[in-house]
Image (cartoon, rainbow, N blue to C red):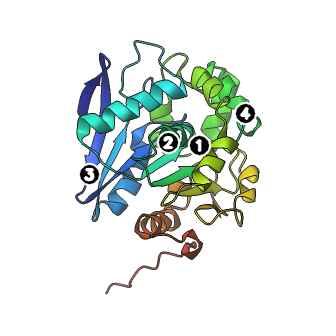
């Protein structure tokens, strides 16, 4: 386990691979751990980093620093501490909101941004997620039936008191539309919004308006994915991510591709 001390608290992170840096931010359900297969998939050409945000996984839970602003500061301190420069950020749910806010505040540091299950507004967030955060037994049973990945279930239980509910309240205040408009006017900036079309945690429908409006912003949905497209359709997601990391200027060239495997004898 790797860790750094930031603002007096221990921040757990992991890093794989060699090459250009890429940073992964997790969402409300889980920790850095569900990014592991994705990190390994691109680690042949990239140095991949993933950290546990305050209140999640194995990072500090001693203070209630669970707002988007707190997490943006954490990410900034982390990349400065690690000497990471110009890294694309891949953020999921809560991590997507943090990544977007970070890209707005640190425009010179982020040229490529992939948001996965980005909440466009407060109404997009399933209210039952708050019940889960409040330790409702019924809500937990519902989530465990829907979340079949043990690495997610185990890590979600580690969330600190208030980490989910307070960060949801903060995410609900993020002016996503304004931020999208800001990014659309930046040269050399790209945003790819990825969603599971069957996501029952974050409603994906508002992002369908992205396509056709701006050349540097695009939405792509994975038809058989729910809230964890990086796990639900891993091969497609990994291929899409690799293509996104390689693309120079034109997001229209991106498309979902099947990952063909060579037959071995």
Q: Could you give the CA–CA distance between mark 1 and mark 4, rounded to whole angstroms? A: 22 Å
Sequence-wise first label, 4 or 3 = 3
- The label number, if any, that marks residue 16 in the structure image: 3
Point out the frontmost of discs 2 and 1.
2
Report the residue marked by disc 4.
122
User: Is label 1 in a helix, a strand or a loop?
Assistant: loop
Q: Could you give the CA–CA distance between mark 2 and mark 4, rounded to whole angstroms? A: 17 Å
Q: Position of residue 155 (x, y in %)?
A: 45, 33
Q: Looking at the picture, does residue 2 appear above or below residue 18?
A: above
Crowding at dot 3, Cα within 10 Å, few <14 / some 14-19 / many 20+, comes out as some
User: Is label 4 in a helix, a strand or a loop?
Assistant: helix
Sequence-wise first label, 1 or 3 = 3
Point out the frontmost of discs 3 and 2.
2
Report the residue marked by disc 1.
147
Question: Can you see residue 117?
Answer: no
Identify which residue, 189 or 219, lies in the foreground.
Answer: 189
Left or right for 260, reference 175: left
Point out the frontmost of discs 1 and 4.
4
> Do tag 4 and tag 3 residues touch (Cβ < 8 Å)?
no
Crowding at dot 2, Cα within 10 Å, few <14 / some 14-19 / many 20+, comes out as many
Sequence-wise first label, 1 or 4 = 4
């Amino acid at each position: 386990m790797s860790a750094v001390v930031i603002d007096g608290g221990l921040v757990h992170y992991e890093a794989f691979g060699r090459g250009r840096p890429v940073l992964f931010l997790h969402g409300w359900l889980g920790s850095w751990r569900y990014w592991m297969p994705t990190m390994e998939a691109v680690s042949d050409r990239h140095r991949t980093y993933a950290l546990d945000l305050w209140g999640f996984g194995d990072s500090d839970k001693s203070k209630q620093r669970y707002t988007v602003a707190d997490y943006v500061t954490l990410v900034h301190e982390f990349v400065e501490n690690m000497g990471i420069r110009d890294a694309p950020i891949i953020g999921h749910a809560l991590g997507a909101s943090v990544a977007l806010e970070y890209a707005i505040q640190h425009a010179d540091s982020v040229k490529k941004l992939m948001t996965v299950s980005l909440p466009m507004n407060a109404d997009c967030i399933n209210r039952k997620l708050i019940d889960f955060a409040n330790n409702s037994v019924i809500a937990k049973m519902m989530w465990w039936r829907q979340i079949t990945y043990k690495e997610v279930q185990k890590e979600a239980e580690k969330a600190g008191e208030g980490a989910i509910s307070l960060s949801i309240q903060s995410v609900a205040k993020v002016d996503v539309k304004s931020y999208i408009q800001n990014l659309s006017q930046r040269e050399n900036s790209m945003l790819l919004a990825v969603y599971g079309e069957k996501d029952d945690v974050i409603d994906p429908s508002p992002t369908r308006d992205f396509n056709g409006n701006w050349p540097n912003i695009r939405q792509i949905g994975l038809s058989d994915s729910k809230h964890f497209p990086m796990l639900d359709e891993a091969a497609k997601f990994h291929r899409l991510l690799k293509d996104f990391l390689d693309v120079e200027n034109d997001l229209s060239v991106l498309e979902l591709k099947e990952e063909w495997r060579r037959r071995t004898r």
